[in-house]
Image (cartoon, grey):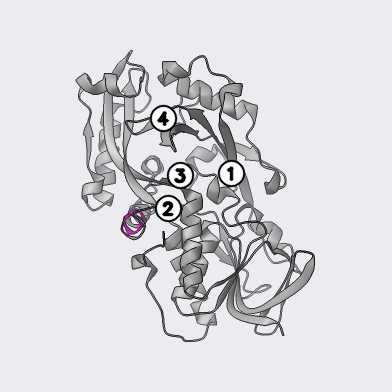
């Protein structure tokens, strides 16, 4: 007999995990299908930051920053073993495009959007302490600002959210490759393959949280529903031996003025990220030598100890894909708001999540739940995800 659920979620990244948790917490039956392993895609290849997005203030994305800062507070309370506040350092040089007054105003607005919590405090570092900042270049250094944001292990965070969902009776099936979506009168049939076996599920609602694969999932329907045009943008990170100890450095790349981060990571140093257009199968994304050189050159500009390093000195490298709306201009300045889309004519009850930020996964999941709830039976909620502790 075919198993039936209120909701089937496709994709085991952070947003699929978050939706599964939200649906289970609301008291509904839910099954999550993942084609590989949990957090095997972009959700284990991010910049590892839980942050409000200071740079989004430049493009006036105030509501996004405020939402992310609130979500950061929930995670600091609900997962202190996974999400930890860290000092962020912004050095300002004579040649830096964003001047001290601009940074100070931005940090003040950041603190305001954070409701002036203690986690929103910032200050300037005394010049006498600059020599302690992990060997950063001191020539032409004018100011160093310090503020606070959070760091996480994105893979462990995603796994913890999945574990939370499972504790509320969510079923997880992996590896399970979805092969077809069949719309019935009041339900959906989701066909998938697992270990060479053809299987299927019945659900009232399907949530497509497949990240870079979202449009590929929609193409499994016949007739095909409306697709949103998106750009896949590759972000690469590298890992170097030796730990950055004083905090996370928020730097302006001298090559193109983009923001890059240099941060501690399990006893080493993580540097990222790039923004490169990607075309092809998301399963084949890979960090290029060009991107590695860009990150090395950007970091070595500020840290003389990296100046003699080349590609062969990189201990590890990885690349993930962001899903952004098609638009003109550099990806760096594009809006980061998430879109939840339903083609009500051709695919009623099939909801697709386009984009999304690691920090705001819970808010995105809550919004998704609010949009699908009218199609689900009335049940008694189990928990409120705003206050639900994540397992260790």
Q: Earlier in the sequence, mark 2 or mark 1?
A: 1
Q: Left or right: where does residue 90 sit relative to residue 224?
A: left
Residue at screen point 44% across, 77% down: 26
299 in relation to 188, above or below: above
Residue with the mark numbered 1: 320
Q: Is residue 40 located in the magenta-colored stretch of the structure?
A: no
Between disc 4 and disc 2, whose residue precedes?
4
**In front: label 2 or label 3:** 3
Label 2 sits on residue: 359
Bounds of the magenta segment: 71-77
Place residue 314 in its image quadrant.
Answer: top right
Among numbered discs 2 and 3, the one appearing first in the sequence: 3
Question: Measuring 28% from the left and 51% from the top, which residue is drawn there?
Answer: 113
Camera-near label (4 vs 2) is: 4
Q: Of 95 and 84, which appears nearest the observer?
A: 84
Q: Residues within 10 Å of mark 4 (few under 14, many from 20)?
A: some
Q: Can residue 357 be spotted in the picture? A: no
Q: Nearer the viewer, residue 54 or 21?
A: 21
Please identify the quarter of the rendering in which residue 135 is found. top left
Tell us which disc is closer to us: 3 or 4: 4
- Give the quadrant of the N terminus: bottom right
Q: Secondary structure at mark 3?
A: loop
Residue at the spot of label 3: 48
Q: Which residue is mark 4?
A: 243
Using the rendered image of the protein, determine whether residue 70 is visible from the camera's viewpoint: yes
How far apart in space, not on screen, are marks 2 and 1 (Cα)?
Answer: 16 Å
Question: Residue 253, percent across and down?
Answer: 46, 26
Mark sitting earlier along the chain (4/1): 4
* Element carrying mark 4: loop
Tell me, yes or no, whether the two marked residues, 3 and 4, touch with CB atoms within 8 Å: no
Position of residue 360 measured from the top left corner of the image (x, y, whole percent): 43, 56
- Work out whether residue 164 or residue 325 is closer to the camera in this orientation and state it: 164
């Amino acid at each position: 007999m075919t198993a039936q659920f209120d909701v089937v979620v496709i994709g085991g990244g952070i947003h699929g995990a978050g939706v599964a948790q939200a649906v289970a917490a609301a008291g509904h039956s839910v099954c999550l299908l993942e084609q590989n392993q949990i957090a095997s895609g972009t959700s284990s290849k991010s910049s590892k930051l839980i942050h409000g997005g200071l740079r989004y203030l430049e493009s006036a994305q105030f509501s996004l920053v405020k939402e992310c800062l609130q979500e950061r507070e929930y995670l600091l309370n609900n997962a202190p073993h996974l999400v930890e506040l860290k000092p962020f350092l912004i050095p300002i040089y004579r040649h830096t495009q964003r001047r001290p007054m601009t940074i100070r105003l931005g940090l003040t607005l950041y603190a305001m959007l954070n409701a002036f919590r203690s986690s929103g405090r910032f200050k300037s570092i005394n010049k006498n302490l600059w020599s302690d900042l992990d060997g950063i270049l001191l020539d032409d250094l004018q100011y160093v600002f310090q503020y606070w944001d959070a760091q996480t292990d994105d893979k462990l965070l995603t796994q913890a959210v999945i574990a939370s969902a499972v504790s509320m009776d969510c079923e997880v099936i992996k590896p399970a490759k979805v092969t077809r979506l069949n719309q019935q009168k009041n339900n959906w049939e989701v066909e998938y393959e697992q270990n060479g076996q053809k299987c299927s599920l019945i659900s009232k609602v399907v949530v497509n949280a497949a990240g870079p694969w979202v449009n590929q999932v929609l193409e499994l329907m016949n007739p095909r529903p409306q697709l949103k045009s998106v750009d896949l943008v590759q972000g690469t990170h590298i890992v170097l031996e030796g730990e950055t100890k004083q905090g996370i450095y928020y730097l302006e790349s001298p090559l193109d003025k983009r923001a890059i981060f240099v941060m501690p990571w399990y006893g080493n140093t993580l540097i990222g990220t790039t923004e490169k257009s990607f075309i092809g199968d998301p399963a084949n994304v890979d960090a290029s030598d060009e991107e590695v050189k860009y990150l090395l050159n950007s970091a070595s500009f500020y840290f003389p100890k990296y100046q003699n390093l080349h590609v062969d000195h990189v201990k590890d490298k990885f690349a993930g894909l962001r899903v952004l709306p098609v638009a003109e201009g550099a990806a760096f300045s594009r809006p980061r708001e998430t879109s939840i889309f339903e083609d009500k004519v051709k695919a009623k009850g099939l909801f697709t999540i386009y984009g999304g930020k690691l920090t705001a996964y819970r808010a995105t999941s809550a919004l998704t739940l609010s949009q699908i709830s009218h199609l689900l039976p009335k049940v008694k909620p189990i928990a409120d995800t705003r206050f639900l502790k994540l397992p260790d």
